Image (spheres, coloured by chain):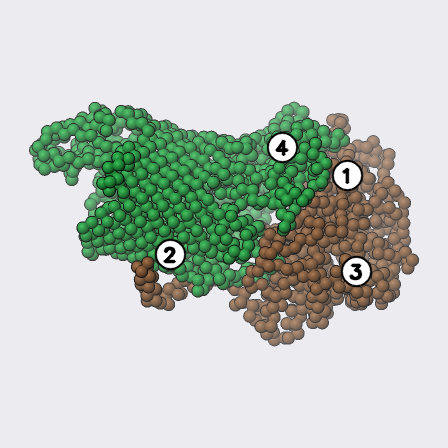
Chain colours: A green, B brown
Amino acid sequence: MQLALFLLVLNILNAYSASSEQQILKVKGKVTDATNSPLPGVAVVVKGTTIGSITDIDGNYSLSGIPQNATLQFKFVGMKTKEVAVGNKATIDVSLEDETIGIEEVVAIGYGTAKKRDVTGSVGSIKAIEIVRSNPVQPAKALQGQVAGVNVNRVNSRPGSDYTIDIRGVHSISFSSEPLVVIDGVMGGKLNTLNPTDIETMDVLKDASSAAIYGARGANGVIIITTKKGSQGKTKVTYEGYVGLKVPANLPDLMTGPEFYHAYNDVVKAENPTAQIIWTTAEQANANAGHNVDWVNEVTDPSLQTSHVVALSGGNENTTHYFSAGYLNEKGNLLSTGYNRYNLKGTVDSKLNDVVKVGFSTYYTYSVQNLGSNETLRSAYRARPLGTILYADLTNPTETNDKNVDGYAFWMGIKDTQVQNPILEVRASNYKDETRVSSFLGNGYLELTPLKGLSFKSSLSVSAYNSRRGIFQGADSKGRLNKLPAASNAYNLNTSYTWDNILNYNYKTGKHNFLLTGIQSALAERFETSGTQVENLSYNSDWYALNTAAIINGVASSLTQRTILSFMGRFNYNYNERYLLTLTGRYDGSSVLAEGNKWAFFPSVALAWRAIEEPIVKQLNVFSDLKIRASYGEVGNDVVAPYSTQAYLNKTAYDFNGVAAYGYAPRNLGNADLKWENSKEVNFGINMGFVQNRIRADVEIYNKKTNDLIQNVAVPTSLGYGSVTANVGKLLNRGVEVTLNTVNVVKKDFKWTTTINYSKNHNEVLELYGGTVTQDIANSLFVGYPLRSNYYYQYAGIWQTSEATEAAKYGQVPGSVKVVDQNNDGKISSSTGIDDRVVLGNQLPKWMAGMNNTFTYKGWDLTVFIYTRQGVQFQNSLLSGTMGDLGGNRYNHLNLDYWTATNPTNTYYGVWQGNPYRQAIQYKDASFWRISNLTLGYNLPKSALNKIKFSNLRLYVQANNLKIFTRDKNIWMDPEFNSGTYQDDVPNSTYLFGISASF
Amino acid sequence: MKKYNLRNFALVVLLILMGAGCKDFLKENSISNITTDSYIVNEAGYEDLIKSCYPLLRDYILNYPLVLPGTDLFQAGGWSVKAIGDGPYLDQYDIRFNSSAGEVSAFWDILYRNIGRTNAAISRADGITYSDPAKKAARLAEAKFIRALSYFYVVQTWGDAPMPLTETIAPDKAVVRVPSATIYTQILKDLTEAETALPVTATDYGRVTKGAAQFLLSRVYLTRGWNFKSALGGATTDFKSALDYADKVIAAYPLVAQYKTLFPTRSNNPLTQYSGTQNDRNTEVVFPIQYNSDILTNAMEVPYPGTGSREPGNYYHSIFPGNGELVGNAGRTSDYNRSLGQNQPTPSSYRFFDPAKDSRYTHDFVNAVWALKAVSNYAYSYTDANAKVSYAVGDTVAYWTAWNKPATGAQKGIDEGGTKKYAVMNLDQIVSGVAISRLTAATPSMWKFWQPGITYGDGYGTFDFALFRSAEAYLLAAEAILKGAGNGALGGAEVYYNKVLDRAVGVGVDPQRAKFPEDLTSFETISYRATPATISIDMVLDESGRELFGEFNRWFDLKRTGKLIERAKKYNFWTKAKGNPTDNNLVRPIPQTEIDRSAPSIQQNPGY
């Protein structure tokens, strides 16, 4: 849409500069909107020519040099294009109608596209403008809260980090529930190699009937990425860029020096007056002086985030092209960490003649991710606040055998050698963890249209994802300490090719419209790894001189391959644009399943009725749009690791009297019965429009049953093995998704629109092992409960002093965690029959919602995006780590309201009590609300743009992840992903200034 | 629906046309991995399978938390008279020591993992042809020995237990506990068969030998003879068998002359540290777990592939308390071992030795620490900021008196009003819970297994761990005789006992131990040389405590002899103060993971 407008504007500019053709007619007039307000900036163009003009501030235009029998087109963003035949009118006044979002949109449906109005399944889409709105570093982030039914979660807070995505609930505990990603037709691409700015649309195929065309790989849904392509017209240049700061935000509160000192002096002495607490002279001095060191602050900083993308697009009627180059720099808040990404994209489509069309596209990404030491942040959270930063500030460094490293006190004046000064650990000279990725996606195709309605396309896609991770641990890093440096490298060489042959036949007769699609597809993937690990490098050479190491303690390489062969057919039938039918069938063979179980057939059927086209519905005068859909489909899943069906050997190492004695031991249980996991899904959908589509509501209801669920099942270890990959049972995912778009206010200069999406998914294990059992505790599978359930004793508060006698019956003392004795047998037991553990909750959201409000006033626009996820319960990783373990004074802790005899709280247990069930207090509701994005933008008016020869110029400021609200305060790094402190960065907000321009 | 079937049919036809091409396209053929069925087909493959039965032995002895603490000799944590709240559950045997305790599942998993390997070896033996049938028989016997050893640990730890005897090919969630007596029968069957086929001297040093089988037969018979809760199927004749096998071992494996020869050579002062080669082979070793200096083959196996990595090598030098962080230390080096707060010798344990006469005391405990770095003006007092002390390299910084010679007055450190410019610690001060000054030293290091010159950290030890050595066979024989086996080849129980003692204190020397090791205020002593009149099970246990201190056996010895609760409550200060072990604690809880993974669930032991 935007592209079309850009082109048009270019054409208009062209018209101004070129000496005009034969002047025959002259027309003027005024363009207004539905409320009769004048519309400035409307493009008025003579259809099929380059003659055109733009309305002025009062909506007036005038056009001369119009050929006879011409038709005028009036185009404006967000309005329906209107065409008026000139005839012999000299004045043409026009009123434009709002274009309702999505009605004529085209969406990807897998191996083709369809008008959204003709879609029979459940497809959610976001367009370029929504994708880049909050300037996500990774494309996955763009989907968060924007498409109902899609659950997107960040993995950690480190720069360049990934996201997990699941669509309509998860299907597995041990295997990925990640949807299939198809990038410009290339299956299995990695989302994080793309620059969001290069993406035109992201279409999410949610129901099985939509995904069935991807049969084998569609079980978890499909995300189809269509990158930007060129279109006809003069070459256009666009620039998108921003620069800003990423600021640590919403951090948990730690004990300060005085609080820490208090917790372990006063509190412990209150328990036991003779207890002795030993501080070093340095710590005692800091405590006496009231000093406090915020170690987290010492190793983090607000950091730069910036991105720049330049794109060229254009073409003539036969050939179009699109090129872009992008650069992204996301620094970590943790010092010396960051992510740099470079993208190059090229796409050319060329029509050689009426029969032959060819094209290719390439997408190249190069990225460098520096993560620094896994240990830095954890050390910063652990280090006692009574520590000393500088060596010179230590009164007697020999007391703690402290070491002066570049002026810093290595042991911080603390007599503990588990945590060292994090300021040294964070230094790149001391620890590097660098991953370089070189990723290539390429696609070339040949399309033949020998007859009208008949086309054949053969497409070859190649993907190469090469990465190298290098780790260097310097002599002063935590992992080494008084040892020479260690280093390792690991190379991955992942390649795949997909060969698709697609036959399309479109036939129209009267009101009948048929489209037949036949596809044959072959996919081969290979994953190669190779790595070396060494110790005791004689000089600091990162991982570039591993051969100089004294010890080579690890060398490994591997090759893993998988293939899928598929035959598919799709039949679309459309009667009078009202009754729509889609039939799909796919026959898939997968290499990773057992012999005899490799092949499976996945059919689907979908029906849609565009009821709005019926006169009787129109006459109701209730709906401005109404479409009702129903579908049924089956999809399969073969996400298991290759080679799971056979028993393999593992190399073992031993020696006999110093002589190497390598052996081979059985490694795994092969599962010769492994077969397809199969899902059957029914989907009902209704698309409604009211008040001239100012209110649009889409509702989807689905019910998806998965059979032969594939899991990595933990088996009794007395068998000699830990787990086996097996088909274990049946699973239900049932839910509802609502998307609401409203135009709340439309005034002359002011407009307010709201988009809300809401989704609720019910996940439930229906059957296990053929109905033989109702629970499999080891694998956290419980019939009647969701996957990823938390199973443990139920928290019942803290034993209070008044309950000492009862506590003693359970072998407990006041101040310790009380759990529910479910069967009231007087003891807490996890034995079968008297098991007091229960399902406490689960790690899947009960519901999610996103709400976006956009206000526009003249050239200004303001967007507020709020996102929420509700009902997730995690075993909180801060409380379960050392940050919540108040029992010792070795490490610093969260500033928690802990129990003492004089503070009889139920919030947190006492400092000294043995707490056999303290895990029970760690299960916390991770529901949150997040103000995800706030953007204020200004679009320069057309008049100003014309002067500077720009077709578009927008300036904006924005804040991302501004604030997060949770039930329990001060226990989360980020409730979205239950982050700990190891291998992580601090949570943050970003503040950006951006420019978007084209000319 | 008709349409579908047609389509389906058409696709199938298409497929058939594609023919063999498709079939090959989807065939899985891993290049990186080899299947069990295609590799274990000949002598070479079978040799590799047998070799794979050995490495996990290194992991067995890492399960020391179930063997050392909670006994009369070791505690899981430092105890003090001021201790409040709960101590280590391994010593207290309280509700926290339940089925979820990681110590329990770790041992269970590793034992059954190796049983799985030996089962594969035993199950696949029939299909393998060796050029030398005797060699094949020996290999099969090695697997049987290792399976028997594993089940012996299983049955001692948990009692009735699952007993798979064939290779697991397909998963089965039904796990059935087999009666202990049946397991003992199987162990003895495997061992007896192994003993017949095994060579006296193995083709490679470190493999199982006839002697190893005889040693284990002795211990298994002895254990069955005691017949724990009358459930092992034992009989008094078992003691005779135990004695016979012990005699065979004693005859074939003579004791070395000096106790310290059995362990790494070292100097007590790191400043003059020994840096020569180490010799871990000697006549006394019956079955050694192998370690070496090649980081690749000294590697530890991890519980399950992909669950993390471990440091390679022997851990035993670093699993006992140390004093690496005293004033004047050299930082994180292995000069004085590490300060792991685990496997603390109980305060009683020192008092079982004669510090002056028993070479084992001298070898096992550090009594002085020297400054390895100069320290100037160290403010040692908590109260007087001007009280300072300086050390030059080589100065003493800490000294522990022998339990029977506590220091007083001028003999004490300057922090206690004495003249020594270092901490002088008496045994009772170690448990007082009072830190006198910043000079206060912790428990004296137990460095029996300590090896100089290796990397700081867990692991890295290269010295073999003697799982069986013949000194123990003497004590097994003494015990068997005391239980009615009749005299052995050397004579009565006291003869066997004194043979071990003689090596430690010298022939005819009369060593004195505390008469009441549990009472730190009592300095009354008693001889621990045995006579026919004094020899008793407790004396044998005292001696095995001294001789095999920290070697992977204590909990099993105490359980076997029915002395665990009595002796732990008497000598282990945590158990004494806060523990309440009952008969239920004589078997460990079945791991929760096994209960949760099995269907129907495996039965838990009573009391857990």
Which chain hosts label 3? Answer: B
Residue ID at (81%, 65%): B236
Looking at the image, residue A124 lies above or below residue A960: below
Secondary structure under tag 3 reads: helix
- Quarter assignment of residue B288: bottom right
**Alpha carbon distance from label 2 to label 3:** 65 Å
Q: Position of residue A666 (x, y in %)?
A: 57, 62
Above or below residue B6? Residue A127 is above
Please tell me which residue is depicted at 59% across the width and 69% down the height of the picture.
B124
Q: Secondary structure at mark 4?
A: loop
What distance separates the C-alpha of mark 2 from that of mark 1?
A: 70 Å
Whole-angstrom CA distance, mark 2 to mark 4, is 54 Å
In the rendered structure, which amino acid carries the disc numbered 1?
Ser
- Looking at the image, do the residues carrying marks 3 and 4 touch, with CB atoms under 8 Å apart? no
Question: How would you rate the neighbour count of disc 4 (Cα within 10 Å): few for under 14, some for 14-19, many for 20 or more?
Answer: many
Q: Amino acid at mark 2?
A: Phe
Residue A602 is labelled as: 2
Residue A694 figure quarter = top left
Q: Nearer the viewer, residue A853 or B477?
A: A853
Task: Mark 1 vs mark 4: give the one in front.
Answer: 4
Callout 2–callout 3 Cβ contact below 8 Å: no
Task: Read off the residue under disc 4.
Answer: A906
Q: Which residue is mark 3?
A: B226
- The CA span between labels 3 and 1 is 36 Å
